Structures are given as structure tokens and as C-alpha cells.
Amino acid sequence: MTTAPSTISHLRAAGVSLVLELPAHGLPTVLHWGADLGDVSDAEVQALASGAVPLLDNSVDVPVQVSVLPEGSAGWMGTPGLEGHRAGDDWSTLFTDTSYETDAVSRTITARAIDAAAGLALTTELRLTDSGLVMARATLRNTGGGDYALGRLSLALPVPQAATEILDQAGRWAKERVPQRRAITVGTHLRENRRGRTGADAATVLTAGAGGFGFRAGETWGLHVGFSGNHVSALERATNGRTLLWGGELLLPGEVSLAPGEEYATPWLFFAYGDGLDAQATRFHDYLRQRPNHPTSERPVVLNTWEAVYFHHDLPTLLELAERAAEVGVERYVLDDGWFLGRRSDDAGLGDWSVDTDVWPEGLHPLVNRVKQLGMQFGLWFEPEMVNPDSELARAHPEWIMQTGGRMPLEARQQQVLNLGIPEAWEYIRAAISGLVTEYDIDFIKWDHNRDLVDAGSTVTHRAGVHEQTLAVYRLLAALKAEHPRLEIESCSSGGARVDLGVLEHTDRVWASDCIDPLERQQILRWTGQLLPAELIGSHVGSTHSHTTGRTHELSFRAATALFGHFGIEWNIAKITDAERAELAEWVALYKRFRPLLHTGTTVRIDHPVDELWAHGVVAADASEALFCLALLSRPSTWPPGFVRIPGLEADRRYRVSAVGPRAALTTKSNAPSWQGGDGVVLTGRMLAAVGIQAPPLQPEHAALVHIAAE
């Protein structure tokens, strides 16, 4: 339907209200985004709107409206939502003559406006999902007579001044998603990513919140940019206190120039409000689980060969590994890097996607056939976006390498980037992968991406090419999925450097980090969970001695950590003891027992006063069951760590609380809490939330599991 001019629209879902003013001559303006306002009347919403935009001191002589695309022409003195020009002209916009369409079922409002003087047409879409996320995107079309050089197109939602702190994530290779927190001040907290991929240091979810907000309480307003290339996330506070969360794609100079009639669409931006970080995370999780392309089959136990054999591919060794994998209950066997032409190390072969007959004289058939006979799926590693200079592909087509300025970019890991924006290069990769998927009946691809994009230009367009490269990768993933509907794909990028909702439109899980040291993984999983539910996060049990950190951990800590994800193994289990193999089989069985809960329930992270004790878990949607992990990361300054409150259960329901899984090491053998002995204890949900359970006296870098089941 067409909305009348200057109306107010109130959208509600899952405890969230989005109140929009829809002017006839301007763009949608958000009057309220946050807690549900209830079933208020139109008159009450109009009353809210009447006082929403005060006249400011020492400013323009009319109230300053800051729309979802902030414009300087409206008096906004901060960062504009649109930057561009037409040969130096048309650099400022004033969008007007706006029409609106409302889809009540999807709670989507689409606004179409024009700036006749600048020769531009803008479409903005705002959607309130069933889970309470606000999704936003914009499309800009050049209606003028000459090319329009686009610098940036971003969208913004306001945050109230009640938000006084900001939290986002940083990190590096093998230590992704490290939280960082600070006070909000006047100015811009700007997170620009220019790596050509999402980045191990990505903000992930940029969150503003009330002072002291935690996992379980305190209002939060967050932003995620659902894009796998260069992008920007920002929080900007003006001197008048007005605060905006904004973001979009980060366009390199000259990367997008719109010819007459051409248009550019932003990626989807996801805005998440919640009372506490857990509530915010639940909105993301519920949204992802409601997608039609969300994985619906049980997430199979994975064995990946990388840290077991690296590049040393030998059929008898890999067959023995498959036999042992089947014995412990593995359901998906993945052959990692090293199987293709000339690949004996990481300095050659990328781009030559054919099985190396020097190592595999009969192809991969002997291994694949045995894996399938053992009842397991077969997966294979690729790095389709990269090419080694020492490869047949690079020698045949040097012009397919992304480059600019008449020079090759600096190498990283002895590799360059293959320009998938070139149709012939794109088709070469599609045909190579699709042919192998067909020949070997491949169920799963581990899709890697091991370097940043430096000087990523196109020899065809002579422009920067990150934008087109990112979209070409999406098209490639979509094409392979269309050709092979059963195929599942994992997004891996030097571990966790491509974790975003853009790539997850085309993939089925992410590899959270190349570091599977459980001490590091506790933090990585904890904060990856701010965006993704457990079933989308690859989480493996590594060897006793961590390959990335050199630490040594008992199997109980490694497995209890890995349990809260898409569980797998990355360990040469053909070389371990019978006792270790038997215990590993117990953990695999435990994962299979609890994966329906782990992969459908609500994530709960507990704010415990002892910083060294981390407690987290999953509560069933009907609150009938829960599984929690209590992990002692280091020795606290006080002892014992006290009681751990367990929220999220029904207050008046009675629950049996008991230990589950192989026992973790205690500081003594005589002071385990009562819930760890015998049949456990029975407590109400109210008691669990108000008092909790005694933390076990764990040794540092150990964990214990708590099963809570309704009586």
C-alpha cells in the first residue's frame, strides 16, 4: 500500500519497537529504536514524535532532522550518509518527493526518493525481523546525464544518550574477536576495514550500551555490517548529544562509478537492540535459524586432517586415520591442503585444481571410497580465490592476478589474489571445483582465503577491484550450491577472518580460528557467539600439545570447550593411546547426545564476579533442559570462587542438577560440590537464578560440565 505523507509508523516484534517518521519531502527518520513501547495509540505515537526534534542553539533556524541517510542539507554537521560527485558537481543531496510502500507481513518499509538537481534516485529499505533485528539497506541510481563517482553510501540508526559505553572486537590471526571497551565521547569511533576480507580484527558487532552493561542486563544497541569485503562501522556522537550507529561498504577511490541508469546497493546492515548482550546475541541467532538456507540436518562430527598430517599426504596414513575416525564416531572426514598439483608446501600449486597423480596415482578414489564405506561424508579443502606465482595457472594467465600500477602486489604466504571479477577466471574456478565435486561425490568444502588483498586492482577495468571481487565470490558460492544442492561449504579465512552475515548467506559454517588451544578458544567462542549460534561455528579438539601456542591441556578441557560449537577433531588420532581414543569416543557420544540442545537452544553467558571463572551454556527453548560449562582460566586471587548463578530457567520448575561427561581435575579429591556426586541435586529455577550452584574447585585451565534437566 502507499503510505500517506508525513505519517508515523510503529513496527513491533520480539520486544522491540521501531518508530519511524515518513515525511513526504525527505527520508525516513527513526524516532525510537529500542524497547517495545506496547500497544500504543496513533495519538500517543504522534505525541512522541512531536517532541522528538528540538530546535538547537547556535544552529540552523529549523529543527535538524537526521534521517536514516544523514544529509548535510538537513543541517546535520556530522558524517553524511552519501558522499560522491559528478565531475566535482552534485556533491550535496536533498532527497525529496518520497513515496512509501509497507509490507505488513515482513514489517518492511521501502522509501523511494529523488534529488532531481543532483540526478539521483534513492531507495531505502527498513525491516524489523521476527527476532527483533532491524535490517537496513539502500540503493542509489544515477538518473543524471554523466557518470557519478560514488565515495560512500551508508545508513544510520540513532542511539539514545543513555548509552555511555562502547564495545566492539579486535584481534589478529589465531586470536580473533578480542573485546575492547571504552567510554563514548564526542566524536567518531571509526572501525575501517581495508583488508579485502572481513578481517580477524573486525568490529563484528559494534555495540553502544548503558553504563556497566553485561551479558544479562543493561540496554545495548549494536550494528553488524553483513559484508565480506572492505567495510566500515562507526558510532558518532555530536556536540548536541545526538548519537548515530552507522556503517556500510568501504569503497576504494574510483571503485564504483555509476553510468547513467546504473545503480549500487549497499550490503544489509543489521541493528540489534537487547537488554544485555545475551539478548542482543539471541536476536542474531534467532534470525539466522529462521532463514530458509539455515542448516537443518544434525551437524556431523568432523575430522579434519590438517594438524594431523599437514602436507604429508600418504594413502596408508590417511586410510588409517579414516579407520580410527570411524571407530570414535566421526561422521565427516575432511582432506585438507596438499592434494592438488605440485602442492608439497604452501609456496606452490594454488590455482592448479587437479589431483596430483604423483601422490595420488589413482586419484582420490581409494580414500574417498573407503571413507564412504565407513559411513562418513567426504570433504575437501580449496583456496579458490588465491594463486601461487609458482603454478601453471599463474604462468598461463598472469593478467588474472589482481594488480595495479604496472606492478605485482607484495606476496603474502607466497601467493597472490586471483581476480574473480574476470569472467574467464571465475568460470575456470567454477568448472574446476564443480568437476571435482561431481567426480568424488564431495559433501563438504573447506573454503579458505589466506591473505589480505593488497593493491587489489583489475587489469581489465584498471580500477580497484575489492567490491567486484567480493560480489564475484558470492556469485561463485551461489552457483556451486545451485549445481550441487547437497554441498555444504565452510567459510575459512586464515581461520576466522571471514565471519560475517554476508558470506553466511552462501555457506554453512565458519572456522572461528586457526588456534584450537582451548584456553584461547574459550574467548574466541565466547565472542563469536555474539553474532553466531553454536551450530555455525567450527569447534575442534586439537592435540594435547597445541600447534599454535605450545600449551599442553588435558582432553577434558579441550573437548568441553569444543563441545559448544559444531564439534570436530583436528588431531592425529591414529597415533594416540587406546585410553585417549576411548575417552575421545565418550566425548563424541556426548556431543551427539546434546547437539539437539546445543544447536537449537538459547545461549547464556554468565556475569560472574570472579573474572577467571567463565560460565556459559545453552538453555532449551522450552526451558526443559540446559547444559553449562564452568571453566577456570587461571588462578583467581580469592578462593573458592563461590556460587555461580544459572539464569534462563523457569522459576517454579524443579530441575535435577548433575555432572556430565568425563570428570575434570579438581584441586583436591574430597571437596567436589554435591551436584557432582551421585544423582546430583534438585533445585528450582528460582533457586538456580538467585543462589546458583557451587563452582567446583577446578585446577586452572580445566572445565566441568553441568547438566540441568526438569524433573
Image (spheres, rainbow, N blue to C red):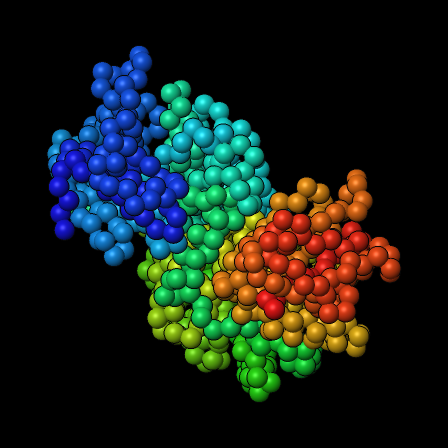
Question: At x 24% / y 28%, what residue is drawn?
Answer: 50
Q: Nearer the viewer, residue 218 or 282?
A: 218
Horizontal side of 240 relative to 663 (left or right) equals left
Asked if 317 appears above or below 96 in the picture, the reply is below
Residue 555 is left or right of residue 114, and the answer is: right
Is any atom of residue 354 visible in this view? Answer: no
Q: Position of residue 248 (x, y in %)?
A: 37, 42
In x, y percent, where is residue 174? 62, 51
- Can residue 320 be spotted in the picture? yes
Tell how many labels: 0
Residue located 40% across and 20% down the image:
239
Q: Nearer the viewer, residue 643 or 512?
A: 643
| In the rendered image, the vertical position of residue 453 relative to residue 553, given as above or below | above
Asked which quadrant contains residue 61, the reply is top left
Q: Where is residue 104 shown, x and y percent of the image? A: 23, 53
Instruction: Please state the horizontal and vertical placement of residue 470, each as a whole percent of the image.
Output: 39, 52
Residue ID at (30%, 45%): 39
Q: Quadrant of the C terminus?
A: bottom right
Residue situated in front as seen by the camera: 5 or 510: 5
Query: Which residue sits furthest front?
Result: 652
Residue beneath the point at 57% across and 84% down:
375
